[in-house]
Each structure stands twice: as C-alpha cells, then as structure tokens.
Amino acid sequence: MRHVSLREANQNFSACIAEVEAGEPLVLMRRGKPVAEIIPYSGAKSDPKREAARKKLLALMDDKIDLGGKPFSDEERHGR
C-alpha cells in the first residue's frame, strides 16, 4: 500500500487511479497523516446470510400479510 500526498495525488490523479485499477490501494496523506484510502472497486459482494434473509423477506412480502396499512405495489415491493 503506497502513501501519496494530496498534492502528488492531485497533480498525478490519472496515474494514481491507474495504480488503483491495477490493484494497488493508495493512502492519501495530508501533512504526514493519513486522511483517506483509495481501494480497487470490488463490486457487490455476495453474502449468503444476507441473500437468504433478503429472499425470506421477499417471500413474506409476497404472502401479502395484512398489517392494516396501504398495500404496496409490486414495483414498490421489489424496487423495480
């Protein structure tokens, strides 16, 4: 992990981003102290527990349990 001053990062932004794209995280420094970290984007990580909970919640929503309120449309329930 390379440490880069804010000035250097500003002057060489494209080169810094190219390093990050190549997999090298950068720590941005201001007056010798770390202030930010730029890391490669890894996309949405799949978490089996989270995915199982999401599917369970959607199944419950599909059961249309009456809670006494205004029913949601399919678009509202599924975020389409």
Image (cartoon, helix red, strand yellow):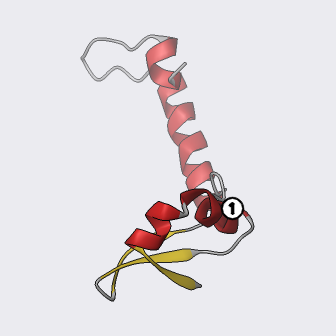
Instruction: Pick the quarter of the image with the N terminus.
Output: bottom right
Q: Where is residue 68 drawn, in percent x and y?
A: 24, 17
Q: Is residue 20 left or right of residue 77?
A: right
The vertical placement of 27 against 9, above or below, is below
**Depth order, front residue of 73/1:** 1
Name the residue located 75 percent from the left edge and 67 percent from the top edge: 22
Name the residue located 64 percent from the left edge and 57 percent from the top edge: 45
Q: Quadrant of residue 49?
A: bottom right
Q: Quadrant of residue 64?
A: top left
Q: How many marks?
A: 1
Q: Quadrant of residue 34?
A: bottom left
Q: Where is residue 16 drawn, in percent x and y?
A: 59, 66
Can residue 15 be seen at all in this image of the molecule?
A: yes
Name the residue located 69 percent from the left edge and 61 percent from the top edge: 18
Q: Residues within 10 Å of mark 1 (few under 14, many from 20)?
A: few
**Depth order, front residue of 74/66:** 74
